[in-house]
Image (cartoon, rainbow, N blue to C red):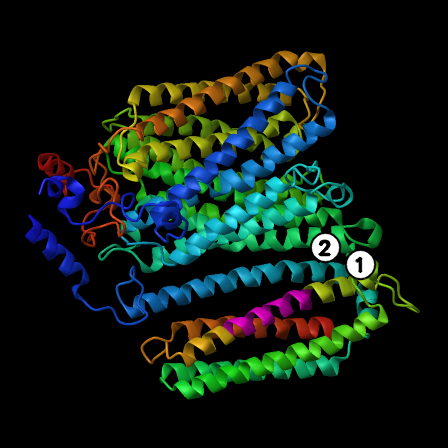
Amino acid sequence: MADAMTPTAAHGHPDYLSENKGLWNWLTTVDHKRIGLMYLWSVTAFMIIGGLLALVIRLELLTPRQTIMSAELYNRAFTLHGAIMTFLVIIPAIPAILGNFALPLLLGAKDVAFPRLNLASLYVYWIGAAMAVSTLLLGGVDTGWTFYTPYSTTTGGGVSMMVLAAFVLGFSSIFTGLNFIATTHKLRAPGMGWFQLPLFVWGMYSTAIIQILATPVLGITLLLLVMERVFHIGIFDPQLGGDPVLFQHFFWFYSHPAVYIMILPAMAVMSEVIPTFSKKSIFGYKAIAFSSVAIALLGFLVWAHHMFVAGMSLFAGAIFSFLTFFIAIPSAIKVFNWIATMWRGSIDLKVPMLYAINFLLIFTIGGLTGLFLASLSTDVHLHDTYFVVSHFHYVMAGSNMLALLAGLHYWWPKMYGRMYNNTLATIACTLIFIGFNATFLPQFVMGSRGMPRRYYNYLEQFQTMHVASTIGSWILAAGLFLALATLLASLRKPKDAVPNPWNGRTFEWEAGSPPITHNFEHTPVCIYSPYDYREHPVPIAEEEKSAH
Amino acid sequence: MSDSTTTVQTDRHAHAHPPGLQHHFTNMTQQFEAAKLGMWLFLVTEVLLFGGLFVGYGIMHSKHPEAFVAAHHHLDWRLGALNTIVLLLSSFTMVMGVWAAQTGQRKKLIAFLLLTVFLALVFMGVKYVEYSHKFHEGLLPGKFYSHQGDTVPGQFMFFSFYFMMTGLHGIHVLLGIVAILWITFRAWRGHFSAQYYGPVDITGLYWHLVDLIWIYLFPLMYLIS
């Protein structure tokens, strides 16, 4: 009887963490929530490895000459940092962790459409990750994460293995995207039309379109690269009648859309966090929804802006430059809509909201500096300098990481049923903001003054800014470590989260914290808009409080 | 309290699931439509995978038109045409298999599936004959190209694409054979009925794509003079 009084047992089903414990049950689970958590800890592990490499790289750059390692080792370090962070961390981060965990809940579904495929994507990720790490035993890779030919077809080491790892990881990404599209089409709760979808779902859907359409092209490009290395098939080799720039076209046809695989999910998280903590209906629902799809489609038409100096006609360059400016519009629409959502809202500065506001600042800086690079003439000056490095860290690393942390702090009570220490999490968020800007703002300055990227030694005049950047990386690392420790520390106490700690309006807050294995005791029915703050449709939080 | 618990539990398991329905779907239609959508999305990725090769082929063909035309004379268009007919026939038998599944005719389903596998094996047999001929002549991709007496240089590039494209297609045929055999086994075990035939249907979709890709490969490889 006493057991029956606890909130979970009252309904007769244990939550998804308590049911079927044990390692084997986790490894064979098809539950989207457990798969999301396994992705969380796998990605976190690689984020730590990639982050440590970044610290080592920054430490080497503390002085203009050799500091702690040789030039050869330095090349391998930044390649591994780039490859791990791109293929193993940023691309899977939000879709595979937060998407897997939250998307079916937001739709009112019991699971994704293909649960076994979902588990397969995790195993494929692990295989790809093992392959990527095994390159260390093959002598490392020194090409940079972009594997540009002809260098990548002539250098030694584990290039083929790393390229095959990226190929394998592509399948993991495709499986996730395929699942999200089918789930969104077929498993929405009764009454949920396309314009009652939470905007997180629109963002994930747009991401999935890119994963489906772009990833196979990367797959075949990487296979061609391996064939070039093994058989010298000639397609990328000018001596055999091929074209090395063709590789860049193929590579960026995927890898530019992939940038939107990284940022669209981050935007998706923002569209949930900002209205919840502004206690106000989202401004411009349809504009945000359609701008996600617009970004997904326009993203396929701008790839050659990575190649303005690689040998391309001026006419083609002008067109790609124009299209690149054009794609800034849907991104700006979103930012203005979020700000309009906050305007006259009743803003609650909880940790997820702090991360969201950080995101707005970081993303705006990253987005606006992109316009300098989109201009043909300024790009000639800034190409391959630290300005580019800083720009893409602001949009890919900073924005994605802040959105991941916003979402993680937002859904953490749902994932583990526990609240974290608000003060410590706020301090961590502040450190991350300071550390990130201290690391990368100086890089804009030195880049615009001519500091080239990927250089091992540099002129004395850049040292002050390199030192500032390196110290920034330590603050950033301390902030991330504190954020992780704060979240982990919450797991030591008993479950204390109510089902709806933030007064959110989407379906996941009607499920328990943590939810049962099949998510909802009764299939929810969609009556209200997901951002309807005028009244409280289902006062679950109060009900559960009185049950205590 | 324990009474209400029991009620909830019985309520949850009271309605009997039709065989083949997975726990997270409401009904068979929803499950079938989801699976079909999933397969179409997968086929999109396949088209783009081959699409990269087709684009590469197109660019290199336009850069080296004489070498490509000269190289393609080493292929026997009659064998290519034979394989085209064989694959088209196999698509027909696959369609008949799906029809047999939809109408719940188990024996016909198994027969048509096995016929499809047979035709796929004929295709691979012809491919084996072609490949061993090329190997013998030294018509190999990239640096392994060792054919003597070429009047037009650079023919190895054509064979780079020939082996990559027909090889990748051949892998898809082999995977198709495995998939159809698996479906045949399940049909033999009596898993399918007029109400539940989704796996047969989506395997059919995959097989038609494999056929379709060959229909593009045949003229690009064998008929470019």
Q: Is residue A210 visible?
A: no
Quarter-wise, where is residue B27 in the image? Answer: bottom left
Residue range highlighted in magenta: B165-180
Q: Is B176 in the magenta?
A: yes
Q: Chain of mark 2?
A: A
Residue picked out by circle 2: A227
User: In the image shown, does B91 or B134 lie closer to the viewer?
Assistant: B134
Q: Position of residue A101 (x, y in %)?
A: 35, 45
Above or below — where is A506 with respect to B30? above
Name the secondary structure under disc 1.
helix
Residue picked out by circle 1: B142
Say which mark, if any, is on residue B120: none
Quick check: A365 left or right of A253? left
- Report if the CB atoms under discs 2 and 1 are less than 8 Å apart: yes
User: In the image shown, does A79 or B78 lie closer to the viewer?
Assistant: A79
At horizontal 64% and vertical 82% (from top left) the residue drawn is B122
Q: Chain of mark 1?
A: B
Q: Residues within 10 Å of mark 1 (few under 14, many from 20)?
A: many
At horizontal 48% and vertical 17% (from top left) the residue drawn is A475
Alpha-carbon span between mark 2 and mark 1: 9 Å
Q: Position of residue B133 (x, y in %)?
A: 80, 75
Quick check: B28 left or right of A218? left
Q: Position of residue A20 (x, y in %)?
A: 30, 49
Q: Is A258 in the magenta?
A: no
